Image (spheres, rainbow, N blue to C red):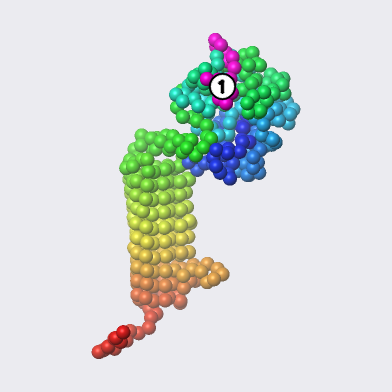
């Protein structure tokens, strides 16, 4: 039986934030969620999240997770105290207990599996992950005696000689839960911090083993915004390198961010300052950017999107968007269409070969195939209480500065005169025009100031 305990009770005061430390995000997911995701791949029988500071916020953030049990640690008196509370709340202490911190977001499931294998193969009382750091400041030092761990000394309790040891405790433990439960309540806060340390159990258990892994960034803990940024950078480098090896070009890799869920086809060029978030899919031979933000959207083959934002929408094949376009949620731009500069599309469907080239707002609308929307066109969809739909049939030509007062329905091959305010439906092959007649006054003399 495998149980997991994730320590997530601390305030994280060095983050200088009102948000609990474990709820800060790396590439769109909280630190805690990333640790949970890694643990889920181990297929544990149960996962305990031990929280304390702003526990309701922490619990709410993972409310959709299955097999998660919340344990409240009050007061927060150290890692050993957290496990004491867990052991009191859980009656059966069977099998293995994997303990890790909620602020180690890059820990790999494969590394955790190696720890579990070592623990089982050596029939250990406790096994933990260690690594050697060039600068071990802030970490507890691990001291070995032969193949076994003799003791762990926390950074704040080290003397000058002990601080020279570069082998550090990564804060990931696998215990024989039965043996741990026999000694856990004997721990005392006899240290400079007056806290109960889980590390004190190491010297109390006979068979204590170390799994030393390479310091490749996955064990980086998060205590401040600098370390948060470093983890984000490590994560982003890994994501972008994967895409580059699969045929994607980044013009300026450092200026871009890509979500883990994003899919990018071959021969896509990602220009500078481009950000792909959420479940975004980009098909092959596209040019995305520069200065472009796409979230939870589909982009088809051979599209170009420049200096624009796209949210929760579908961009089909051979489409040009931008610069300075805003595609809002629930929009679909069909193949061979064009969305030009300073255009906003919201909750609308544009059929194939449609064009909205300049300075227009298309909201709650259906635009037919091969229709051209002139500059400055507005679909006035809101009457003060409700949103209404505008429908324009295929092969229509909409004059510049046309305003459609929805709800309204235009047939196929309709033309509107420039500057018109259209308030009535129009049939196929009609001209709709609504404007005052121009008057020219000859020999006009302007008043002099």
The residue positioned 66% from the left and 38% from the top of the image is: 52
The residue positioned 45% from the left and 35% from the top of the image is: 230
Q: Give the range drawn in magenta.
A: 145-160
Residue 97 horizontal/vertical position (percent): 64, 25
In this rendering, position of residue 90 left or right of residue 428: right
In this rendering, position of residue 77 left or right of residue 344: right
Q: Is mark 1 on a helix, strand or loop?
A: loop
Q: In which quarter of the image is residue 129?
A: top right
Q: Is residue 337 visible?
A: no
- Nearest the viewer among 272 and 159 is 159
Is residue 147 shown in magenta? yes
- Nearest the viewer among 95 and 28 is 28
Residue 317 horizontal/vertical position (percent): 36, 52
Q: Is residue 137 visible?
A: yes
Residue 103 horizontal/vertical position (percent): 55, 34
Q: How busy is the neighbourhood of tag 1: few (under 14 within 10 Å), some, or many (20 plus)?
A: some
Residue 286 horizontal/vertical position (percent): 34, 47
Could you tell me which quadrant the N terminus lies in?
A: top right
Vertical comparison of 36 with 122: above or below: below
**Residue lying furthest top in this view?**
146
The residue positioned 55% from the left and 25% from the top of the image is: 155
Is residue 289 shown in magenta? no
The residue positioned 58% from the left and 34% from the top of the image is: 102
Total of numbered circles in the picture? 1
Vertical comparison of 104 with 286: above or below: above
Vertical comparison of 218 with 359: above or below: above
- Nearest the viewer among 236 and 377 is 236
Judging by the rendered image, the residue that carries numbered circle 1 is: 158
Could you tell me which quadrant the C terminus lies in?
A: bottom left
**Residue lying furthest left in this view?**
443
């Amino acid at each position: 039986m495998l149980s997991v305990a994730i320590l997530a009770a601390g305030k994280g005061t060095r983050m200088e934030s009102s948000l609990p430390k474990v709820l800060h995000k790396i590439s769109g997911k909280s630190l805690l969620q990333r640790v949970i995701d890694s643990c889920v791949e181990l297929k544990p029988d149960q996962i305990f999240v031990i929280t304390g500071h702003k526990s309701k916020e922490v619990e709410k953030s993972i409310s959709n997770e299955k097999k998660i049990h919340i344990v409240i640690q009050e007061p927060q008196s150290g890692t050993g105290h957290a496990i004491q509370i867990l052991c009191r709340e859980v009656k059966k202490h069977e099998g293995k207990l994997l303990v890790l911190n909620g602020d180690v977001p890059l820990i790999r499931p494969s590394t955790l599996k190696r720890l579990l294998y070592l623990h089982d193969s050596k029939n250990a009382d406790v096994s933990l992950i260690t690594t050697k750091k060039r600068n071990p400041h802030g970490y507890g030092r691990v001291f070995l005696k032969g193949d076994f761990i003799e003791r762990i000394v926390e950074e704040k309790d080290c003397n000058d000689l002990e601080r020279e040891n570069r082998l550090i405790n990564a804060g990931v433990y696998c215990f024989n839960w039965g043996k741990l439960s026999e000694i856990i309540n004997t721990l005392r806060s006899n240290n400079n911090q007056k806290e109960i340390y889980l590390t004190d159990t190491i010297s109390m258990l006979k068979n204590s083993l170390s799994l030393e892994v390479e310091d490749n960034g996955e064990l980086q803990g998060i205590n401040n915004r600098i370390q948060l940024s470093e983890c984000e950078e490590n994560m982003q480098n890994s994501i972008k390198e994967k895409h580059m090896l699969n045929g994607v070009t980044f013009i300026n890799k450092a200026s871009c961010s890509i979500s883990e869920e994003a899919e990018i086809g071959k021969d896509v060029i990602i220009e500078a300052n481009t950000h792909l978030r959420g479940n975004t899919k980009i098909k092959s031979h596209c040019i995305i950017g520069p200065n472009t933000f796409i979230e939870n959207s589909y982009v088809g083959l051979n599209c170009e999107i420049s200096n624009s934002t796209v949210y929760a929408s579908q961009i089909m094949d051979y489409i040009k968007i931008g610069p300075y376009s805003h595609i809002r949620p629930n929009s679909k731009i069909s193949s061979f269409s064009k969305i030009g500069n300073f255009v906003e599309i919201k909750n609308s469907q544009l059929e194939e070969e449609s064009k909205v080239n300049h300075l227009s707002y298309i909201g709650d609308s259906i635009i037919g195939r091969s229709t051209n929307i002139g500059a400055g066109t507005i679909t006035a969809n809101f009457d003060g209480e409700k949103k209404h739909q505008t429908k324009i049939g295929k092969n229509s030509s909409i004059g510049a500065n046309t305003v459609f007062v929805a709800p309204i329905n235009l047939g196929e091959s309709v033309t509107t005169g420039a500057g018109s305010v259209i308030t009535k439906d129009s049939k196929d092959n009609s001209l709709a025009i609504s404007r005052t007649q121009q008057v020219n006054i000859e020999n006009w003399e302007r008043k002099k100031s």
